[in-house]
Amino acid sequence: MGYHLNFALVWRHFDKLWGGLILSLELAAASIAIGMLIGLALAVAYVSGGRVVRTVISTYVEFIRNVPLILLVYLVFYGLPTVVDIRYDATTSFVVTLAVYAGAHLVEVFRSGLEAVPRGQLDAGKAIGLTPWQRLVDVRLPTMFRITLPALSNTFISLFKDTSVASVISVPELTYGAQWINLNTFRIVEVYLVTAGIYLITGYALLFGLRLIEHRFRVGS
C-alpha cells in the first residue's frame, strides 16, 4: 500500500510545534547565558591559575565533552535526585544540564580567545598603569569576544539544536511536540518534515542574526 502525504492533521495541531519552538528558544537562551558565565569564569581561571586549577578544569571539560548529552540529561534528571535530596522539574533539570554542557564547550572557546589577545595590547595597558583587573575587563575580554564571535555563533546554533534532547524527559519543546502529533495522528513523515523545516529556518535565522553581530564587531572593523 502506498503512503499518501496529508499535512492537514499536522497543520491542525501546529500550535504544538509553535509552542515547542518558543520553549526551545527559551531553553537555549537560558542555557547559553548560564553556560557563558561558567565557560568565561573557568577560562579566566584556567589562563591565570596554577597546575591544580588547570587540571580540575581540564577534567571537567574532557568529561562533559566526551559523554553524550542524552546520558547527562538522564543522570541529572533521574540519577542525581536518588543520591542527593534535591527536587526539580524536567525543564529546570534540562536547563542545568545543557548549561553545564555548554560551559564545557565554551571554556575552550574563551580560553583560546584569551590566549589569542595580542601581547602588545596587554603591555600597553600595563604601561599606562592599568591594574590586572582593569586589563582583564577593559582590554582582554573585549578583544577576546571579538576574536571568538565566529566560534560562538557555531556553538550557539549547535546548542539550539541540542534542545531537542529535552524531549526524552518530556519537556514540551519542538521535538516533543512533533512526537505528540505523530502519536496522535500517525503522520510520521509529514510531521517530521515540517519539524525539520522549522529547525532549518530557525537555525538560519539565528545564524543570520549572529553573523550580523559578528560583522559589526569583528576584529579590524
Image (spheres, rainbow, N blue to C red):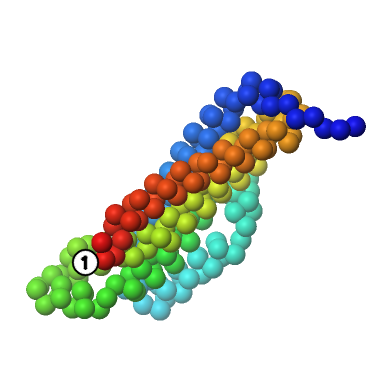
Going 59% across and 64% down the picture, which residue do you hit?
66
From the viewer's perspective, is 204 left or right of 138? right
Question: Residue 42, image x and y in percent?
Answer: 39, 64
Quadrant, the N terminus: top right
Task: Name the one closer to the observer, 42 or 157.
Answer: 157
Residue at the (66%, 38%) spot, across then down: 193
Secondary-structure class at tag 1 = helix
The amino acid type found where label 1 is placed reads Val
Looking at the image, the residue that sits furthest to the top is 12
Inspect this view and state whether residue 19 appears: yes
Q: Residue 7: x, y in percent?
A: 69, 27
* Drawn side of residue 103 relative to residue 83, left or right: left
Where residue 179 sits, quadrant-wise, is: top right
- Position of residue 135 in the picture relative to residue 104 (left or right): left
Which residue position holds label 1? Answer: 139
Relative to 142, does residue 121 appear above or below in the rendering? below
Q: Say left or right for 217 vs 60.
A: left
Residue at the image point whose x is 21% and y is 78% from the top: 120
Instruction: Relative to 15, say whether 153 is above or below.
Output: below
Name the foreground residue: 219 vs 2: 2
Where residue 68 appears, as percent x and y from the top left, is 62, 57
